Amino acid sequence: MDNMKKYAFYMPKSLIDDVDNTINSLGKMSRAEFIREAVDFYIGYLNSLRASDYLSPMLSRAIKSEIESVEKNVSEMIFKLAVQSAVTNIFIASELNLDTSNIDYLTKCAAKEIAKQNGIIDLKKASEMFRTE
């Protein structure tokens, strides 16, 4: 009982009945122990609310920063892919001596196939499509 001090509190009888019923269901524990643990728990709960008020904006900023970083990386990858695709297309067009009507036809076919597949490009299906048309 070191560092313990006695206090008198008023509590509604219904609350004391709830405390006693809970103590009986838990087993061996005094009313004083129960009240100390309940107060300690409630203090921790209140502190966690303050912590969440502090942590939520920090977490939000960290998540936003991470999303922006991923967005930047994906944008750079798409740009590099577009450049390489353009180089490949220019090379193929020049080697096959494709004119604008051939390029327009291939563009329409590719757009139609990609739309039909919901943006999923299947090389085998694409090659079959061009052989049948």
Image (cartoon, rainbow, N blue to C red):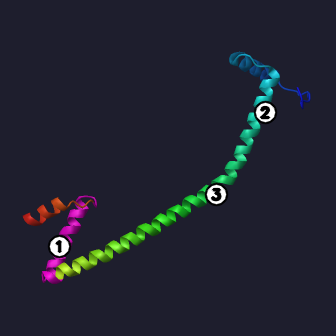
Query: How far apart, in angstroms, are the residues tagged by discs 3 and 1?
Result: 50 Å
To which residue does mark 2 refer?
39
**Pointer 3 residue:** 58
> Of the residues under marks 2 and 3, which one precedes in the sequence?
2
Is 88 rendered above or below residue 58?
A: below
Mark 2 lies on a secondary structure that is helix
Question: For the residue marked with disc 3, what is the amino acid?
Answer: Met
Callout 1 crowding tier (Cα within 10 Å): few <14, some 14–19, many ≥20? few
Can residue 133 be seen?
no
Residue at mark 2 to residue at mark 3: CA–CA distance: 29 Å
Which residue is denoted by mark 1 in the rendering? 106
Image location of residue 71, percent across then percent down: 46, 66
| Magenta-drawn stretch contains 109 | yes
Q: Quadrant of residue 125?
A: bottom left
Residue 29 inside the magenta-drawn segment: no
Q: Nearer the viewer, residue 118 or 49?
A: 49
Above or below for 16 versus 44: above
Magenta residues, as a range?
A: 94-119
Q: Circles 1 and 2: CB distance less than 8 Å?
A: no
Disc 2 marks which amino acid?
Answer: Val
Q: How many C-alpha atoms fall within 10 Å of the one at disc 2: few (<14), some, or many (≥20)?
A: few
Q: Position of residue 103 (x, y in %)?
A: 18, 78
Question: Going by the image, does 2 lie left or right of 85?
Answer: right
> How far across and how far down the image is residue 120, in percent?
27, 59
Quadrant position of the C terminus in the picture: bottom left
Q: Could you say whether the residue bearing mark 1 is in a helix, strand or loop?
A: helix
Number of the front mark, 1 or 2? 2
3 or 1: tag closer to the N-terminus: 3
